[in-house]
Image (cartoon, rainbow, N blue to C red):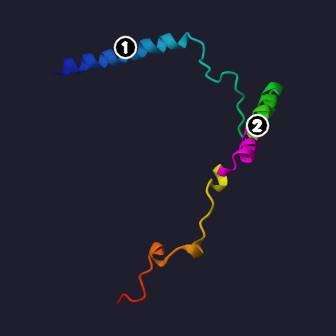
Amino acid sequence: MIISRGAGALRCVLSHVKSKSLTQNLQPIRNAHDAIWTYRAPQPPQKKYIRVMADALGGIMWWWIFWHLWHEWGHIVGEFEYPDPSKWTDEELGIPPDDEE
């Protein structure tokens, strides 16, 4: 029984040693993709084309909002005229009649 347990442990150790020796010869992996790390420092300025695209997309967004507010304002305020509450009956308001006890 001790031999069967030792074989599994030996396989685990050998696989660990093999993986270590393979990764030691490789260059370190960098997953930053040219990102600049800023920790407790001001962020560096963005590239000019990114600022221009952000301004352009922001302008398009605000044009879209104001265009629809001007031409389709019924979506905001409602498309039907507001009912006059003074014309509602007691029954519609859920008020019981006066002669009921």
Residue drawn at x 27%, y 18% as measured from the top left:
8
* In the displayed structure image, the side of residue 72 where residue 101 appears, left or right: left
Q: Secondary structure at mark 1?
A: helix
Across and down, in percent, residue 74 comes to 66, 51
Examine the rendered structure and indicate whether residue 84 appears above or below residue 40: below
Pick the residue in front: 83 or 34.
Answer: 83
| Secondary structure at numbered mark 2 | helix
Work out whether residue 15 or residue 79 is closer to the camera in this orientation and state it: 79
- Which image quarter holds the N terminus? top left
Q: Measuring from the top left, give residue 84's x and y in whole percent.
A: 60, 70
Q: Relative to 95, is 68 on the left or the right?
A: right
Mark 2, Cα crowd under 10 Å, few <14 / some 14-19 / many 20+, is few
**Label 1 crowd (10 A; few <14 / some 14-19 / many >=20):** few
Residue 85, visible in the rendered structure? yes
Residue of label 1: 14
- Counting from the top left corner in percent of width and height, residue 86 is at 59, 76
Residue 41 visible to the viewer: no
| Residue identified by numbered label 2 | 58
Q: Is residue 56 above or below residue 70?
A: above
- Check disc 1 and give the amino acid type: Leu
- Establish if 96 lies above or below 74: below
Q: Is residue 27 left or right of residue 12?
A: right
Characterize the magenta stretch by its predominant secondary structure: helix
**Magenta-colored stretch includes residue 65:** yes
The C terminus - image quarter? bottom left
48 versus 17 height, above or below: below
Q: Quadrant of residue 60?
A: top right
Q: Which residues are magenta?
A: 63-74
